Structure formats: structure tokens, C-alpha cells
Amino acid sequence: MSSQAEKHVVIVGAGFGGLKAAQELAGSPVRVTVVDRQNHHLFQPLLYQVATAGLAPGSIAVPIRGVLSKQDNARVVLGEVVGVDTDRREVALRDGTHLEYDWLILACGAKTSWFGNDQWAEHAWGLKNLRDALSIRERVLLAFEAAEREPDAATRRKLLTFVVIGAGPTGVEMAGAISELGRQVLVGDYRNIHPEDIRVLLVEMADRVLTPFEEELSHSAQRQLEDLGVEVRLSTRVEDVDADGVRLS
Ligand SMILES: Cc1cc2nc3c(=O)[nH]c(=O)nc-3n(C[C@H](O)[C@H](O)[C@H](O)COP(=O)(O)OP(=O)(O)OC[C@H]3O[C@@H](n4cnc5c(N)ncnc54)[C@H](O)[C@@H]3O)c2cc1C
């Protein structure tokens, strides 16, 4: 067991970074406190599966307390850090309490960048947390419901047009999964929706998908997306997003 005399390490964030730091300190003569505003660690790489109804939220979220339960020198605090006072060596939590530290590790992750177009957030979603994933899932499933009841074919196709912006790993996975969900899973459950009604566009400013990877892999990924029915639009900028749609360059 740890004692009050030992140095106190406060870790903000129980993502991969924060948990790894905490686990590396197991057995060290320090007290470790992991603070997170959520009670669960989220496996972000599979968020797209939740967003496309392939997995339930609980499949990719594990309780932080459970992960650290066997680590005697670690404790978990549920709370949102709203400030750090480096002179006093304490972090402030939203509930008005403070935690003193000797060492502080900030592992708060990242948030979605709208590349200077924050107003787009009103009409589109990022994919960083379960709330985002569930919003996308709801929107996709409700679009199918609306399309099923829509007698006009053109309006039906409009309802079933999905635009994914950005062909990095997340965009590629999302576009492929939406197309697969629509064409291979949902279409059989609806009477008035046909595979050709469903349109998934993946828009990318660069001249290939998955730019951090080798060109050969980009081309292979693009072919696989096209086999799934995704329209890949390369060298194309998104100029505006509003309630009616997306304007492309
Ligand atoms: C959709 C998606 C798919 C991905 N796919 C892959 C992949 O296939 N392979 C791969 O290697 N990487 C992938 N990544 C990237 C990888 O998930 C991230 O690099 C990794 O999660 C970052 O870990 P982190 O600990 O820095 O932050 P995070 O995992 O984001 O954790 C940050 C934690 O800090 C908490 N927090 C934030 N602010 C506060 C605050 N003020 N107070 C208290 N708590 C706070 C949050 O609740 C969260 O639990 C993917 C990411 C996304 C979004």
C-alpha cells in the first residue's frame, strides 16, 4: 500500500496515454490518481463500428476503475479538470474541489478540428467520443426510416446520400462501413429502399486516400471502397456545409 508521505502523481485523462502512464507507475513508490470526466476508458479505434450499429457502446468502453483495480498505488477520481495552478501544484475540478500534486501528467487527448469552420459543427459530426458515434448512428438509421416512407424517388435518394469529409483512417472506415451497412445489412429490412438509392461520398482534398500510408496501400483502399459502392472524390475541397448539403469545389 502507498502512504501519504509518497509523492503524488496526478494523471488527467484515462485514454491510452493516461492509462499507460498509470500502469508504468505500478510498483513505484508514488501515489497515483487518475482523473477523468468519464467513468470509462474508450477504445476509439472502434468508434466507427458503434456509429454504424455494428457494436454496442458497451463493447468499446471499459470502466477505468476496473482497469486499475489491481494496482494498489492507483486510485480513480471521476471529475472534469477545469484548471491547473502550477504555483500551488494543484488541479481544479469542475465541482469546486482541488487535487494537490507533486507531478502532473496531462493526457487529455485531442478534439475535432473543423479547420477554421466551426460553424459546420452544427450540421456535421466529428467522431471522437460515444456521443458523436451515437449521434451518427441515430442520424443514419433515421434517414433510412424517412426514406422508407418517402414516395418520391429523388427525395428518397437525397435522404440516403451520406457525405464523409476527409479520407484519413477514420473517414475511410466510416465511408466503407456506412455503405456496407446500407447496401448489405439494412437494405434487406426495408421494402422501398433499393441499393441504388444509397449514395456514400468520401471527399478528400489530397489526391489520394490515406495519405500517411504508402501509395500502393492508398490505391488498394480506394479500390476496396469503390467495391463497397463508395464514390471517392479526390482533389476536392469542401467549401461549405449547411442544413441543405455540402458544397464541393
Ligand atoms: C475514430 C478514431 C479512430 C482511431 N483509430 C485508430 C487506430 O486504428 N489505430 C491507432 O493507433 N489509433 C487510432 N486512433 C487514435 C487513438 O485513438 C488516439 O491517438 C488515442 O486515443 C489518444 O490517446 P490519448 O490518451 O492521448 O487521448 P484519449 O484517448 O482521447 O483520452 C483522453 C481522456 O482524457 C479525458 N479528458 C479530457 N479532458 C479532460 C478534462 N478536462 N478533465 C478530465 N478528463 C478529461 C477524456 O475523457 C478521455 O478519457 C483513432 C482515433 C479516433 C478518434
Image (spheres, helix red, strand yellow):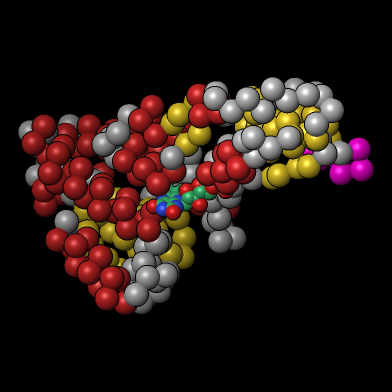
239 is within the stretch colored magenta:
no
Q: Is residue 63 visible?
A: yes
Q: Is residue 163 visible?
A: no
- The residue segment tinted magenta is 82-88
Q: Tell me the quarter of the picture where residue 30 sits.
A: top right
Q: Position of residue 130 (x, y in %)?
A: 45, 35
Q: Position of residue 109 (x, y in %)?
A: 59, 47
- In-front residue for pair 51/9: 9
Q: Quadrant of the N terminus?
A: top right
Q: Position of residue 144 (x, y in %)?
A: 22, 37
Is 142 on the left-hand or right-hand side of 14?
A: left
Q: Give the vertical position of 190 relative to 226 (above or below).
A: above
Q: Quadrant of the C terminus?
A: bottom left
Is 197 on the left-hand or right-hand side of 237?
A: left
Q: Residue at x 35, y 30 (%)?
A: 59
Q: Tell me the quarter of the picture where residue 21 sits.
A: top right
